[in-house]
Image: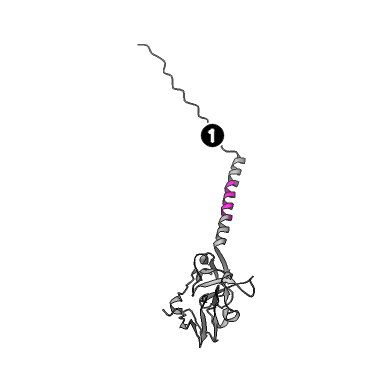
Amino acid sequence: MTDYPFNQPTQPTINEPKPPSIARRILGFLGSVLQTVVFAVILFFVVNMITARIRVEGDSMEPSLIDGQFVVVNKLEYALRDPRRGDIIVFNFPLNPTRRFIKRIIGLPGDRLQVLDGQVFINGNLLNEPYLAVPPAYNDQWDVGMGEVFVLGDNRNNSSDSQNWGALAMEEIIGKAIFVYWPTESMGWIPHYDLVAAADGG
């Protein structure tokens, strides 16, 4: 029997990948940062297209909203449907469009609205308003035109609203106030009352 020398099989040569250079790592990091910044900018513009944030100024909406609260406004709300009685809206102040006001919609196009002895009547029907702390101290009557809404503050006797300067053109509406986000102890969804049944005599 002939003995043959046992040769170990040759191991294939493996080329270890070189670690990326410092320049390549810096470029990769900068690329990731750029992607994050671009995403943040796009998100910022999208959020600002569909929402607004405003600060409640004054006590005209008490007790529903308090001076100093910050609220989120849904700017797409009325692209999808018409305004409703009871909605709390943000709009450009007709006498100074650079200012933004927040009030509640009480009257809709074609409504006849009357305030008498501390109560509000829409088309002759009494409006139930559980959100009022103090009834209005004034008496008057208004007709709401087409393309308009009639807005009042919940603090009726300390509010600059439609009883002072008339009905609001719908094109001045920015959106519907939906959420209080500051201060944190006030954080929560803003209640909107369905006033349709009361106004229509239902």
Magenta segment, prevailing SS (helix, strand or loop): helix
- Residue at image x 52%, y 81%? 113
- Element class at badge 1: loop
- Residue at image x 43%, y 19%? 7
User: Where's the N terminus, which quadrant?
Assistant: top left
9 or 75: which is nearer to us?
Answer: 75
- Where does residue 182 sit, x and y in percent of width and height? 54, 68
46 or 172: which is nearer to us?
Answer: 172
- Where does residue 169 sit, x and y in percent of width and height? 58, 73
- Residue at image x 48%, y 78%? 131
Residue type, mark 1 in image: Pro
Residue extending furthest toward the left: 1
Q: Which residue is mark 1?
A: 17
Colour option used: one colour
| Picture layout, residue 142 above or below residue 56 | below
Q: Is residue 80 left or right of residue 22?
A: left
User: Where's the C terminus, which quadrant?
Assistant: bottom left
* Magenta range: 31-41
Numbered label tally: 1
Q: Quadrant of residue 163?
A: bottom right
Circle 1 crowding by C-alpha within 10 Å: few under 14, some 14–19, many from 20? few
Residue extending furthest toward the bottom: 117
Residue 38 lies within the magenta run? yes
- Where does residue 96 sit, x and y in percent of width and height? 64, 73
| Picture layout, residue 60 above or below residue 53 | below
Residue extending furthest toward the top: 1
Residue 70 lies within the magenta run? no
113 or 135: which is nearer to us?
Answer: 113
- Where does residue 64 sit, x and y in percent of width and height? 51, 76
